[in-house]
Image (tube, rainbow, N blue to C red):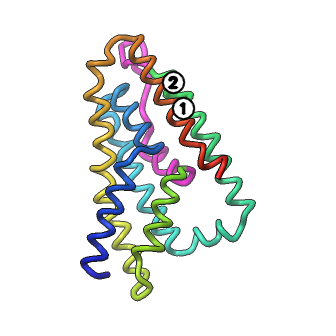
Amino acid sequence: MTADLLLAFVAFAFVTSATPGPNNVMLLASGVNHGFVRTLPHIAGISLGCMLMLVLVGFGLGGLLLASPQLYALLRYAGAAYLVWLAWRIARSGMITPGNAGSHPMTLLQAAAFQWVNPKAWVMVVGAVTTYAPHDSFVRNVCVIAIVLGLVNAPSVALWACCGVGLRRLLDQPRRRRAFNLGMAALLVLSLYPVLWP
């Protein structure tokens, strides 16, 4: 992989990681409701999940899903159902207080698994493999772009959790926090539009 191609991929990874999507909406809400430290496993899960997904798609799993329309449709609708469930959880979230201390953000494994049903993650990894992994030394190139994706993705998505933390003071009143959570849940459901009506 040439330096120019790698630099272009860094720009691609930043843009696809930092722009709004299901992961970033959930991280913004988690930053508001749980704080940055409690959201760190969610951030790590997103990056590790995307890296693993990129490697597996690069090594052929993506071809299997595209060759099996039924399996692809099942994954797409299961992902949509999961996003609706996550939106419901966000809508019901509230400020962490002694009375609801059992509330928690996504775990590392939950966030990593979520990437398999996240339409934006699919677009990102398929685009990365098909555009930025030259066929010469393909296996090495896929591994390189997976590592670079992780290095770019983690700080990019962490910015959304930081923004959520910054909003905490503004949303310290229960009514404002409720309106914010309902808005984030609605945005998450709206992100299903390209999945259900391609």
Q: 77 or 51, which lies in front?
A: 77
State the SS at label 2.
Answer: helix
- Whether label 2 touches label 1, CB < 8 Å: yes
Q: Quick check: is 178 in the magenta stretch?
A: no
Q: Quadrant of residue 28?
A: top left
Q: 92 or 132, which lies in front?
A: 132
Residue in view at x 42 percent, y 29 percent: 104
- At label 1, the amino acid type is Ala
In the rendered image, the quadrant that contains the N terminus is bottom left
* Residue 5 position within the rendered picture, expressed as x and y whole percent measured from the top left: 31, 76
State the SS at label 1.
Answer: helix
Q: 103 or 3, which lies in front?
A: 3
Whether 134 is drawn above or below 14: the answer is below
* Residue 74 position within the rendered picture, expressed as x and y whole percent measured from the top left: 70, 53
- The residue to which callout 2 is attached is 91
Q: Quadrant of residue 99?
A: top left
Can you name the residue that lies furthest to the bottom here?
136
- The residue to which callout 1 is attached is 87
Q: CA distance from mark 2 to mark 1?
A: 6 Å
Q: Which residues are magenta?
A: 94-117
